[in-house]
Amino acid sequence: AAGPRFLAWNARGHVAMFRDQQRMEAHHAEGQPQRFSDSLGLNMAAISESACCLAAGAGAGGGSSQLLIRPVERWEKTVLSASMGAADEAVEAVACGSDFVAALTSKRLLRLYGLSGLPLGVLSVAGDSVALAARGPLLLAVTREAGAAPPADADDEADDALEYRLLDVRGRSQRMAGRLPLSP
């Protein structure tokens, strides 16, 4: 039997996938592990002090992309599912903050949700998704610069032009934005 594949790991806990058993486990730093089945083909996750979010990207599990939110305080209740909009919109990155969940999608949208799954906002991003990270009320979104194509292969010497946005989700403001400096 194959061991677990870790989808998220930080000081708040970790999320592990047991593909051969079609099972997921979320372990918060304090408390018992939560086990649940995976019939959607979940392939990405994030964990914070107040929630765990999981997503199935494009083509995962043979269906459309899905985003699931599991608040820590409501493990006994039904898992909350957040709407993605168009059927061909796929989740490409996820992050959880203290009171929100975020998803970058294939339609170049940054979707923000409350822990109940209620949409908080939708922001357009200029380029393709690269990464999301969150802590407390802050969200860092990294995308390719507008018009920048991904490298053709791993040996490509061309620089990846990336840009970032640091958002205060609770305050509904953008704290910083710009080009992300990368070393060769």
Image: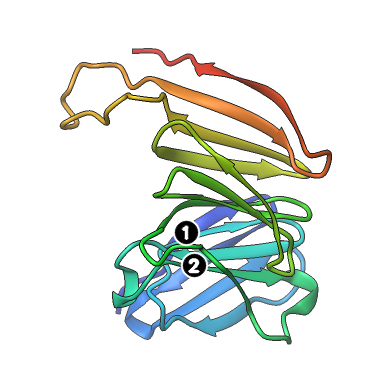
Q: In this view, does 11 lie to the left or right of 39?
A: right
Which residue position is annotated with label 1?
7
> Along the line of sight, which residue is nearer the eye, 62 or 27?
62
Determine the secondary structure under disc 2. Answer: strand
* Residue at position x 75%, y 43% in the image: 169
Q: Position of residue 35 (x, y in %)?
A: 57, 82
Direction right: furthest residue? 171
Q: Where is residue 54 in the image (x, y as percent from the top left)?
A: 53, 65
Amino acid type indicated by mark 1: Leu
Dots 1 and 2: beta carbons under 8 Å? yes
Q: Where is residue 92 in the image (x, y as percent from the top left)?
A: 42, 51
Which residue position is annotated with label 2?
16
174 to 101, vertically: above or below: above
* Residue at position x 16%, y 25% in the image: 155
Q: Which mark is residue 163?
A: none
> Which of the image's four quarters has the N terminus?
bottom left
